[in-house]
């Protein structure tokens, strides 16, 4: 199974809402990632978890809060988002989080903030 | 500051011909390079990679060339097939202990019959 799943596929939320994005993999990978992709732009790294510990935070605003309950699951908690946060949020995983690891991506959650 | 650039937003190639996708980078700390392919409504899929100690890596129809002095890499697909139509991203990873990919802006390849 080389699949990374993400739920929901689409999410519309107001600026005062609290919601969560979920990501799951069953490949035994120990590193998981959140990326943000705006229209016609490349994916941009937000967070990296390695062995269930947050190892990289790319200066992401605190309205985005990641959580890694176990090595198979990754959540992104959203609160008080702005319309400019509307984007495709991609989750990925890799074997150990080393520079030469191949990253496997999920299909993404398309988020719209109204 | 775009550290990885793909200057051609789109490319159209006839089936059976060679597709050449280009990528330039500015950060000298990058030492590992990857190409990903993305279909609509799917996440990027890993295609091929190359380490900075090599100048060429081949996998079937796909070959990646790296010119370190020019900070340039290219992906050759030969022969091109209609199923290759997708957006191609090059990505770079710096020296270090963590996987931290910086993606290029992408090139949309269309392979026509």
Image: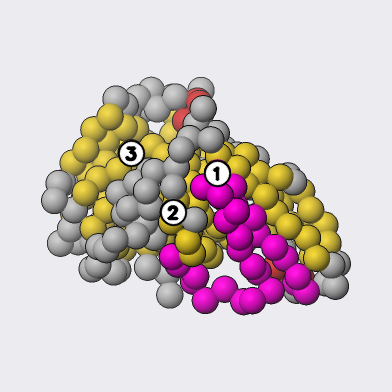
Q: Residues within 10 Å of mark 3 (few under 14, many from 20)?
A: some
> Residue at the location (76% across, 70% down)?
A79
Whether A67 is among the magenta residues is: yes
Q: Please state the horizontal and vertical placement of residue A17, each as a whole percent of the image.
A: 84, 67
Whether A68 is among the magenta residues is: yes
Q: CA distance from mark 2 to mark 1?
A: 10 Å
Find residue A51 and name its label. 2
Q: Please state the horizontal and vertical placement of residue A32, each as a whole percent of the image.
A: 49, 52
Determine whether, in the image, residue B81 is placed left or right of residue B25.
right
Residue at which label 1 appears? A72
Image quadrant in which you'd find residue B7 = bottom left
Q: Which residues are magenta?
A: A55-81
Q: Please state the horizontal and vertical placement of residue A69, each as a whole percent of the image.
A: 60, 53
> Residue at the location (31% across, 27% down)?
B61
Q: CA distance from mark 1 to mark 3?
A: 25 Å
> Residue at the location (69% across, 74% down)?
A63
| Between A72 and A10, the one nearer to me in the picture | A72
Q: Is most of the magenta stretch helix, strand or loop? A: strand
Image quadrant in which you'd find residue B42 = top right
User: Which chain letter goes with mark 2?
Assistant: A
Residue at which label 3 appears? B48
Q: Nearer the viewer, mark 1 or mark 3?
A: 1
Determine whether, in the image, residue B110 is placed left or right of residue B102.
right
Image quadrant in which you'd find residue A50 = bottom left
> Secondary structure beneath disc 2?
loop
Compared to A64, does A99 lie above or below?
A: above
| Image quarter of the N terminus of chain B | bottom left
Q: CA distance from mark 2 to mark 3?
A: 26 Å
């Amino acid at each position: 199974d080389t699949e990374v799943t993400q739920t929901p596929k689409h999410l519309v939320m107001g600026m005062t809402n609290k919601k969560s994005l979920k990501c799951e993999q069953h490949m035994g990978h120990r590193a998981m990632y959140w990326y943000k992709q705006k229209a016609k732009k490349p994916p941009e790294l937000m967070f990296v978890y390695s062995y269930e510990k947050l190892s990289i935070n790319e200066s992401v605003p605190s309205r985005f809060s990641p959580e890694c309950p176990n090595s198979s699951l990754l959540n992104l908690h959203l609160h008080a988002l702005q319309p400019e946060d509307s984007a495709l949020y991609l989750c990925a995983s890799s074997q150990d989080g080393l520079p030469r690891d191949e990253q496997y991506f999920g299909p993404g959650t398309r988020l719209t903030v109204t | 500051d775009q550290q990885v650039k793909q200057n051609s937003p789109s490319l159209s190639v006839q089936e059976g011909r060679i597709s050449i996708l280009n990528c330039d980078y500015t950060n000298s700390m990058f030492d590992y390079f990857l190409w990903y392919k993305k279909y609509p409504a799917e996440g990027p899929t890993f295609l091929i990679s190359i380490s900075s100690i090599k100048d060429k890596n081949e996998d079937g129809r796909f070959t990646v060339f790296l010119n370190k002095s020019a900070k340039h890499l290219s992906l050759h697909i030969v022969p091109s097939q209609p199923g290759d139509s997708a957006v191609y991203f090059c990505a770079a990873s710096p020296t270090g202990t963590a996987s931290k990919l910086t993606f290029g802006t992408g090139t949309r390849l269309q392979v026509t019959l």
